[in-house]
Image: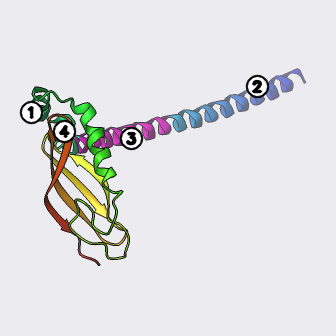
Amino acid sequence: MKNKIFMYLFIFTLLILLFQFVNSKNIYDDSNAKVANTKEQIARYKDSMSQLKEKNFELSLFSLENNDASITYLEREGLDYKTMIPLINDKLHDLNDYKGEEHPLIPYASMNGGKLLINTVKILNHQWIIADYTDGQISGELLIKYEFNNKSELNFKLLESFIYPLN
């Protein structure tokens, strides 16, 4: 009888060990799969980050903040580009508050009776700005020259403009 009890205990212990081994192997394989999946995701994210960095660099090429020659020119003129950027943006957006039907810079009339408004402004260098405009129906872009008279008064001059054709 004593031998049977030891045999049953041995078989039971063997079954528990077998269960533990299979369970541990499944957990180990699952964690390895998760690690491999995580490594693949990290590689994809690193690739995406490098593409975004490259795209960001390309987008920043034509920008006053990254144009050393323009910054040097403005500093020689006694102007601080960091304070100029918000000032120029504000002045251009202030032009959206006009009376009548003609915008001071946009040479087109609204087609739906609304106002043509300047939306996005990109300051290219110490002289030029690109801006887009819309009235909700039509849209286009402007190339604007700007200058500071006597380092205090900001003047805009429209160089080129176009309107996108309606679909």
- The kind of residue on which mark 2 rests is Phe
Q: Is residue 162 magenta?
A: no
Tell me the residue that label 1 is attached to: 69
**Mark 1: secondary structure:** helix
Q: Which one is in front, 56 or 109?
A: 109
Tell me which label, 2 or 1, sits earlier in the chain: 2
- Tell me whether the residue at label 2 lies in contact with that at label 4, contact meaning CB atoms closer than 8 angstroms: no
- Number of the label disc, if any, that sits on residue 10: 2
Tell me the residue that label 4 is attached to: 64
- The kind of residue on which mark 1 rests is Ala
Whether residue 24 is situated above or below residue 144 in the rendered picture:
above
Q: Residue furthest right?
A: 1
**Mark 4: secondary structure:** helix
Q: Which residues are magenta?
A: 32-56
- Tell me whether the residue at label 2 lies in contact with that at label 3, contact meaning CB atoms closer than 8 angstroms: no
- Number of the label disc, if any, that sits on residue 158: none
- The kind of residue on which mark 4 rests is Leu
> Separation of disc 3 and disc 1 at Cα?
43 Å
> Separation of disc 2 and disc 1 at Cα?
85 Å
Q: Residues within 10 Å of mark 2 (few under 14, many from 20)?
A: few
Tell me the residue that label 3 is attached to: 40
Q: Nearer the viewer, mark 2 or mark 3?
A: 3
Residue 98 occupies quadrant: bottom left
